[in-house]
Amino acid sequence: MSRRCELTGKGPMTGNNVSHAKNRTRRRFLPNLNDVTLQSETLSRGVKLRISAAALRSVDHRGGLDAFLAKAKDDELSANALKVKKEIAKAQAATA
């Protein structure tokens, strides 16, 4: 399982551990990933995703999963999230 957010593409970053004596050793900063089930109003079902805490706040801020995926860039989304985005767009086109 990769350490990458399925909605934002946020992944591990590198940096330094800096001791009191200013010795520097390389380290990794991992994203805060959580397994969540987000509800889609259009599909009337839950979607399981592995996303960062920052992405979870962004989904809430934009008004839910459907609104977030409508604005999201396809190259940042995972294959699973891209599939859900296309399902939502198809379902919205069928009702309109």
Image (cartoon, grey):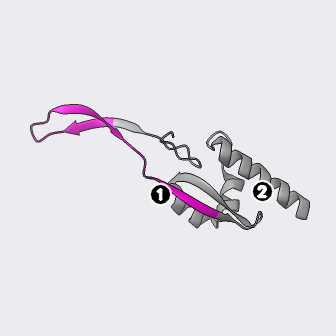
The residue at 61%/56% (across/down) is 48
Depth check: give the residue in front, 93 or 1: 1
Depth check: give the residue in front, 79 or 74: 79
Res 29 quadrant in image = top left
Residue 26 magenta-highlighted: yes
Mark 2 crowd level (few <14, some 14–19, many ≥20, 10 Å Cα):
many
The residue at 90%/59% (across/down) is 94
Q: Is residue 58 above or below residue 17?
A: below
Res 47 quadrant in image = bottom right
- Name the residue tied to disc 1: 53
For the record, the magenta segment spans 15-38
Marks counted in the figure total 2
25 with respect to 74 (left or right): left
Counting from the top left corner in percent of width and height, residue 74 is at 68, 42
* Observer able to see residue 73: no
Overall secondary structure of the magenta stretch?
Answer: strand
- Name the residue tied to disc 2: 88
Residue 11 badge: none
Counting from the top left corner in percent of width and height, residue 42 is at 77, 65
The residue at 66%/61% (across/down) is 65
Q: CA distance from mark 1 to mark 2?
A: 23 Å
* Observer able to see residue 66: yes
Q: State the quadrant of the C terminus.
A: bottom right
At numbered mark 1, what does the secondary structure look like: helix, strand or loop? helix
50 with respect to 87 (left or right): left
1 and 2 marks in contact (CB < 8 Å): no
Counting from the top left corner in percent of width and height, residue 41 is at 73, 68
Amino acid carrying label 1: it is Ala
Query: Which residue sits furthest left?
Result: 21
Amino acid carrying label 2: it is Ile
